[in-house]
Image: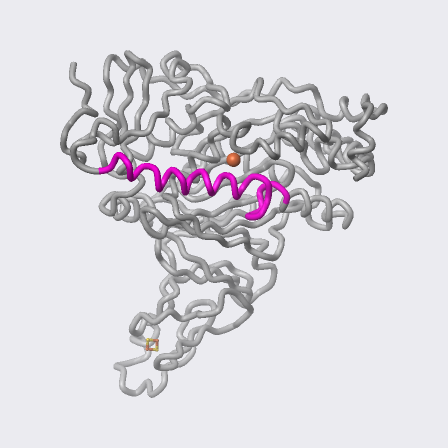
Amino acid sequence: MTSPSLSPDPDAAPLVVQDWERLAFRVHRRAYRDDALFAAERSRIWDRTWLYLGHETELPNPNDYKVRALGGRPLIFTRDSTGELHAFLNSCPHRGTVLCRETQGSSKHFNCFYHAWAFHNTGEVAAIPDPSAYADEEYKASMRLREVARLEVFEGFVFVSFTDDVPPLLDHLGAAADYIRMIGEQHVAGMEVLPGTQLYSVRGNWKLAVENAMDGYHFSPTHNTFVGYLRESGFAVTDDDQYAYNLGNGHSLLILTGHGGRISMLWEPRFGEDERVRTAEHRREMELRLGSERAHLVADESHILFVFPNLLLFDLEGLSLRQLEPVAPGNTDVRAWQLAPRGEDPAVRDLRMRTMVSFVGPGGLATPDDIEAYEAVQRGIEATAGNGRAELDYSDMSRGMAADAAGERGRSTDEGAMRGFWRHWVRSVGAGGPVDIGTPPPPRPEPTPLPSSRPHGLDEILAGTETPAGQEEVAAR
Ligand code: FES
Ligand SMILES: [Fe+2]
C-alpha cells in the first residue's frame, strides 16, 4: 500500500498519520507554519471551546482588573464593584476602540477616549455625551459592554468561552479536574497567584510549547546543566517509573517523581535543612487533613498538566501556570504566573521564589533551553517545506507507539501524550482525523493514571534523620 504521506501535493498530504504496521506516528510540519490552519485553529478551537483566562486571586478586590487576550481577542478581566467576575471584550460598543489601554489597575468605570462613552464595570453604560441624538433609553442600554458568552470558575481557575455551545466546564475538564483540585489541597489555606506576570514572546508555534511540556524525552539532554546541578546537590535524578497519560478532550498529564523535590512537600538536599524540618511538619498536617493516600498523590508526585488548548500547569518544585496565546503560526505569547500558599511562612516563600526562577522562570535553568528548542524546530522545519519534499515534511512522534497499540500507559520519556494531543487537534481543527495505515487497535478507554510507586515522602523525611555524607555542605550553600 502507498503511504498517504507520499502525496506530491503538500496541501493534500495528511496532517497526522499513524502507521500501525511500523508503529510509526507522523505530524505534517505545515501544522506549525500554515496560515490557513492557523485561521482554522482560531475559528474551530479558540472560538469553540473553554479557554483559561486567569485566576480569581489575581483580582482580590472589587474593581480590580487585568487586560488579557485570548485567541486574538482583547479582553478585560475584572471584578466589578459588587464582587462579581466578568470578561468583557476590550472593544468599545460604539465604534470598536480598545477601551482599556492600561494592563491592570482598579477602576469602577471604563472610559473610551475616542468619543467619551463611559461604562460601569458591571457592563452598563454610565454616560454617553449628547444622548439626545439617540432614539431612547432602551437604545442606550443596548450599548452595554460586550461580554464573553460563558464564564465559569473551577477551584479559583477562571475559564471563558466565546460561544454558548460548550459543555459545562467540569465536563470539559473531565479527568484533568482532579489534578487541578489537588493544587488547592496542597495547603490548608489554599493557593493564590502571586503579583507579577512573566510575559515573553516565542518565535515558535504554540503547539511546540505543548509538545515540549509533554516531552520527558528531552529532559536529560536539553537540561543537562540542571540535571548536573541536581546530581551534585545529592538528588538522584531518574526517568524510571514515570508515565504520561491522555486525559481526554485533548488534556494530558505527566506524573514525575525523579526530576526534583517539591517545596514544603517533598524535601531534597538543595532546599536546605530548615526546609526539611518545615516539610515534615507540613506533611503531618497533610496526612491528618487529607488521609495518607491522598496526601501521597498531592505531595509526592510532580505533575505537568496540559488543559487543552491554552493552559499549562507545572506543579513541580513550586507551581507555575502558563497561558499560551498564539499570535501567528510562528509566534506565541506566553504569560506565566506563580501560585503559592496563602499566608506562607516568609522563609518558605523566599525559597520557593528563588527555586522557581532558577528553573521554570524565563531566565532559569530550564525555560531558555526549552524556548531555544522550539524556536530551533520552527526554523529547522523550513528545510523540508514546499513541493518536491512532501515525503520529508513530517515530524516523527513514534516513540513508545507499541503502548498505544496495546492500550497500555506510556512512559514519560515516550511520545504518547503528544500523540494524544495531535489526535485531538486534528479532529478539532476540522481536518477529519488521523489517517491510519494498517489495522488500528480496537477503540478502548485511555489508561487511567495510577499513583506513583515512590515511597511515601513523610516516611522518607522522618527516616532521613541522617543527612547523607556530602549533602549537608551543599545544602548549606
Ligand atoms: S469608539 Fe468609543 S466612544 Fe466612540
Ligand atoms: Fe524542558
User: Where ligand 1 lies, by quadrant?
Assistant: bottom left
Which residue, as the protein is rendered here, is positioned at the far left? Answer: 8
Residue 398 is left or right of residue 345, and the answer is left
In-image side of 203 versus 370 (left or right): left
Quarter holding the C terminus is top right
Give the percent coordinates (x, y) of residue 381: 31, 37
Main SS of the magenta segment? Answer: helix
Range drawn in magenta: 358-385
In this rendering, the answer to whether 244 lies above or below 129 is above
**Residue 425 picture location, percent across and down:** 32, 35
**What x and y, as percent, mark residue 464?**
81, 23
Quadrant in the picture for residue 258: top right
What residue appears at the point 34 percent right and 31 percent down from the top-left corner? 422
Viewer-side residue, 304 vs 122 = 304
Q: Position of residue 420 (x, y in %)?
A: 38, 27
Query: Does the stretch in magenta take in 364?
Result: yes
Placement of 105 over or under 70, stated as above or below: below
Residue positioned 35% across, 79% down in the render: 114
The residue that appears at 50% across and 24% down in the rendered structure is 412
Q: Is residue 192 magenta?
A: no
